[in-house]
Image (cartoon, grey):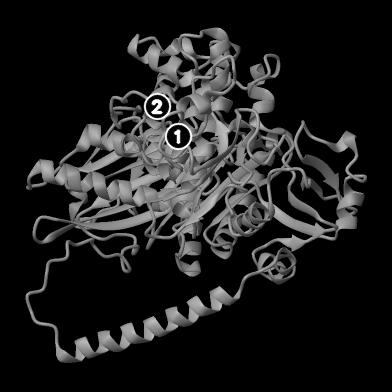
Amino acid sequence: MFLNQQERDGLESSESTINSKAFGVCFHVACAHKCSETGFFIPHGKFDTNRGLLLSSLASNVSGRGGFYNSSVGQGSDRVYAVGMCIPGTEPKVCSNCIHLASNELMETCPNQTEGLLWFEKETLCMIRYSNRLFFGTLEMEPSYKVYNTAAFQVNLTEFDNTWEALMLRVIAQATSSSNPMYYGAGIQKIGSSRNIYAFVLCSKDISPWNCAKCLRQNVDDYRSCCSGKQGGLTMRLSCFMEWDLYPFFGVFQNQTSPTTHKKDSKKISTGTIVGIIVLLTFMSSVLLALGLALCRRRKTYQEFATENADDITTSGSLQFNFKAIEAATCNFHESNKLGHGGFGEGTFPNGTEVDVKRLSNSSGQGEQEFQNEVLLVAKLQHRNLVKLLGFSVEREEKILVYEFVPNKSLDYFLFDHRKRSQLDWRKRYNIIGGITRGILYLHQDSRLTIIHRDLKASNILLDADMNPKISDFGMARNFRVDQTEANTGRVVGTFGYMSPEYVANGQFSMKSDVYSFGVLTLEIIVGKKNSSFHQIDNSVGNLVTYAWRLWNNESLLELMDPAMGENYDKDEVTRCIHIGLLCVQENPADRPTMSTVFQMLTNTSITLPVPQPPGFFFRVRSDLNPLADSLESGPSKSTMSFTCSIDDASITNVNPR
């Protein structure tokens, strides 16, 4: 464990999850290593030579590439894969020295083993690993190792546990932020009147933020189960590392401060302060007035938007494409390039770049405002689980959006086809649920904007080559101010079955209305059927949400599973996802979790889920296919609101991603 030297005598190792051979600990400099127990190579052979070449090159490559580097050398059975990393932000010289010493240490410790890993401390923390198999990007949870200080912490244990948990949640969230994952987090939390807790977490940068969070959560759970109340400790795995102490370590806490509760100052405000405030308020009022007048004068026509905003979109990473170039790329929008029944088609530019093209016809429901909205919003969003906008074109009354090429069409293409949905096993579906969670969390919380999507559904989830989900179609999305929590509209847009009760009845939308849509989508992913299709199966339930609620009450949730997934699944994961889905579709928006909470629930199985309240039953699809008129017959907003919706298959745009 990486504590002060005088405390090392108080350390113990916990081997509750591994045997003593899995990890070794050395204390001339603090380190922990793992060598393969089954794989060996012939000394001085080709594998040995390749290992030496690769490990000797790590120091310069890791320090020169921002603290992380992976590579391989050799062919066939002599091929060696290796990775090295330092704490992000470590001075290159310090990083290089740590990696250099770690490489020498590991080759001595694992003289002829085909796999080895070393966590190493020398002025900073670094890690190196090599193997005869490709492990890049793979989450590996076992083996694990725990070390802790045997001295008990002499404070109120309840207060300590709550403080410790809060700090761990904070640093893990810092490490795995969906918008800008740093893969490490450091934080300080005050405990009692005069002491601080210092916590640090680190993940290998080649795994996803989702897997990083999963690994770190398990570290926290393991440490909590073995060593709660001790004065410091660490847990490490092949993919992640966690340590906390009562003293700073690794030099990562210089810019960290402990959150404090601000108390009211009983001292009077000075005259100078009051004058300063008055001057500042006067200045701000003048600026706001000038801005208001300027905005009032800038009433743009559609053509003004096309020309004036082109530069703004270009600087956001998008381009204004020439319409003829798009025509050529799509063979004049030939039917053979069309994907599904919507307005998306494939195209290939002369340089070989494949793209998806969304063509909005004059008859489509997406007007000028929605088109502007989608261009300006999506151009500012960058996330692996959001489809990337490459550019647009507004010529000859045509409105065209050009997106990155996503080869596997959309989720509904597989999920709602009785032959194709067998390609979506549980692992793929679980990954899709996780990716959608991260994408919505980015929109709601982690991007520089706060975006409410308003049209989440299976056909708006595109799938890349590895079946990773990408949220698309932002024509109905709305941008919230920092301090805004909800809004109302007199024009309800979206898709029946996915819209929340408060949105349909009152035009009220918020993050919680997106959460409702996510809950429906999660249940659809598990069952492999549309929310609205259950009226064909059982008229007494009307929709999937109602059916899932019935199974919850009957304690038979696994009956909801799609038989096409077969038997290879984790029952606890499936049950937990259904439970989360039901929490998301509760009728009262205040009862629904935020997407941040959903993310925590999915990645931390130790969190006890609350009992869901009954869902909103607004969308019992009847044989007359007119549930809206029925549900709004006595609604107060019937005469003042307009509705442009569909029943699961399409939204107001009439342009499906696939």
Q: Which residue carries the number 2 mark?
A: 616
| Left or right side of 488 for 150 | left
Amino acid under disc 2: Gly
Q: Residue placed at 46% from the left, 18% from the top?
A: 570
The residue lying toward the viewer, choosing from 383 and 603, is 383
* Picture coordinates of residue 301, whole percent (x, y): 70, 67
Q: Is residue 377 above or below residue 427?
A: below
- Front residue of 439/566: it is 439
The image quadrant of residue 601 is top left
How many other residues sit within 10 Å of disc 1, few (<14), some (14-19) or many (≥20)?
Answer: many
Which residue occupies 17% across, 61% down? Answer: 261
State the image coordinates of residue 588 (x, y, percent, origin top left).
Answer: 33, 34
Q: Position of residue 343 (x, y in %)?
A: 76, 40
Question: How far separated are the C-alphas under marks 1 and 2?
Answer: 8 Å
Residue at the front extreme, as displayed: 639
- What residue does disc 1 label? 500
Residue that appears at 30% across and 32% down: 607
Q: Is residue 396 left or right of residue 612?
A: right
Task: Classify the position of the C terminus by image quarter.
Answer: top right
Are circles 1 and 2 on residues that touch, CB within 8 Å? yes
| Badge 2 density bin: few <14, some 14–19, many ≥20, Cα 10 Å | some
